[in-house]
Image: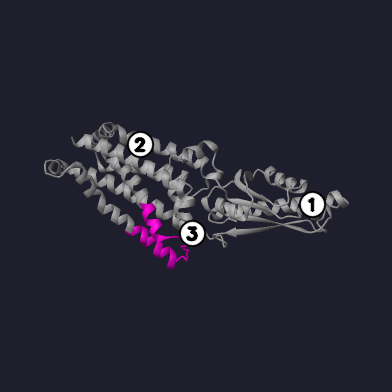
């Protein structure tokens, strides 16, 4: 009995060794998970891109700006001249916060009067918004303590000082569902398009029916399009399904254009289909294709901003995230659904998806066509 069991074990080990690509993926997945979870799985926000609207331009206002910079939470990335300019930066996702210092701030500070400053918070990501909300008020309290100590040598805030009034845009209640459900659309689109496309083509090869299709009058391009289109339709059905359930069940508002959302989702689907086609040209079995698809999904899950804010990640991983197509799609989804923005503020992300789609699909189609030949 032991001998027969050992013989089966030996046979199975031989099968594993003869499939080095699957073996490599199996050994690489834990390492990738360890690195991504160790460095990317964090909500400790630092150096958050912040815009400043300084309507006072005095020494006192510059001191307040420097106090925000000194906390380490905020990085003054832009100085704007109007609230409209500030709104454009928040809409496009270039900044997550904005400090608004009114005219007369310095004079009120010099006179020891009560003064207020505004602070805009992008509430589309509740994890970031909560940290920014608390940090913005902490700076105001610290400034009040400093004023009191300088004037009266007191340690208790018994006199008027600086009051920070945060305003949360797009998601005032900071509901996590408003953040997660648009992200789920992008994740579902990529997962379905990539995995189902790869499995469908590899299944044809594994069952021996690919050769039968090749000898028919069907051209390679027609074969690829015919295999992919059903999964495009399935992906779009799931997109609409998530939107409907999110809107009616979870109360997620849809502020932007659904037509624009569908058009830009098509660009993202081209990229995901290209990844699936490329995997199908490399994998020999459905199991291998599934493992490779999962391996490709790992960076997208952790480095796209789906779960964890990009601002909390090390700089090296933030740079790597620019090579993740899902990063741009999530910005588009949350921009259209939560912020109601149009194509203008999303032009950079749209061009990124176009470039990714053309490059990835061209490479995958060339490799697939060469394999068919």
Q: Is residue 99 above or below residue 16?
A: below
Q: Is residue 9 magenta?
A: no
Q: Work out whether residue 188 can be spotted.
A: no
Q: Secondary structure at mark 2?
A: helix
In the depicted view, which residue is nearer to us: 291 or 313? 313
- Label of residue 145 in the image: 1
User: In the image, is 263 to the left or to the right of 208?
Assistant: right
Specify the quadrant of the image occupied by residue 220: top left
Residue 348 in the image: x percent, y percent?
46, 45
Residue projecting furthest to the front:
81
Q: Nearer the viewer, mark 3 or mark 2?
A: 3
Residue 364 in the image: x percent, y percent?
29, 38
- Residue that mark 2 sits on: 25
Residue 36 in the image: x percent, y percent?
48, 40
Q: Nearer the viewer, mark 2 or mark 1?
A: 1
- Residue that mark 3 sits on: 340
Q: Secondary structure at mark 1?
A: helix
Q: Dot 2: few (<14), some (14–19), or many (≥20) neighbours within 10 Å? A: some
Residues in magenta? 237-265
Residue 123 in the image: x percent, y percent?
56, 56
Q: Separation of disc 2 and disc 1 at Cα?
A: 56 Å
């Amino acid at each position: 009995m032991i001998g027969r069991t050992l013989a089966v074990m030996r046979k199975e080990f031989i099968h594993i060794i003869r499939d080095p690509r699957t073996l490599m993926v199996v050994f690489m997945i834990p390492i990738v998970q360890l690195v991504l979870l160790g460095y990317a799985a964090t909500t400790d926000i630092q150096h958050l891109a912040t815009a400043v609207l300084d309507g006072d331009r005095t020494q006192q206002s510059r001191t307040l700006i420097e106090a925000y910079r000194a906390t380490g939470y905020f990085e003054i990335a832009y100085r704007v001249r109007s609230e409209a300019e500030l709104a454009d930066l928040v809409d496009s996702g270039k900044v997550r916060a904005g400090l608004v210092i009114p005219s007369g701030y310095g004079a009120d500070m010099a006179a020891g009067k009560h003064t207020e400053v505004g602070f805009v918070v992008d509430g589309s990501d509740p994890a970031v918004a909560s940290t920014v909300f608390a940090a913005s008020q902490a700076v105001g309290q610290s400034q009040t303590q400093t004023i009191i100590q300088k004037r009266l040598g007191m340690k208790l805030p018994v006199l008027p000082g600086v009051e920070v009034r945060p305003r949360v845009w797009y998601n005032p209640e900071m509901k996590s569902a408003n953040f997660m459900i648009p992200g789920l659309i992008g994740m579902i689109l990529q997962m379905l398009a990539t995995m189902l496309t790869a499995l469908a083509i590899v299944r044809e090869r594994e069952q021996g029916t690919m050769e039968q299709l090749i000898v028919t009058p069907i051209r390679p391009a027609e074969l690829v399009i015919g295999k992919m289109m059903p999964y495009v339709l399935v992906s779009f059905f799931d997109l609409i399904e998530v939107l409907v359930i999110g809107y009616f069940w979870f109360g997620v508002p849809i502020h932007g254009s659904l037509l624009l959302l569908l058009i830009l989702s098509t660009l993202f689907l081209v990229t995901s289909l290209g990844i699936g086609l490329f995997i199908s040209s490399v994998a020999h079995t459905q199991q291998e294709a599934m493992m490779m698809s999962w391996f490709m999904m790992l960076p997208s899950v952790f480095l796209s901003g789906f779960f964890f804010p990009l601002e909390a990640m090390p700089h090296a991983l933030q740079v790597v995230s620019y090579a993740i197509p899902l990063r741009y799609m999530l910005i588009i989804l949350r921009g259209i659904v939560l912020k109601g923005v149009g194509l203008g503020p999303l032009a950079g992300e749209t061009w990124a998806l176009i470039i990714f789609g053309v490059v990835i699909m061209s490479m995958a189609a060339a490799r697939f066509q060469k394999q068919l030949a």
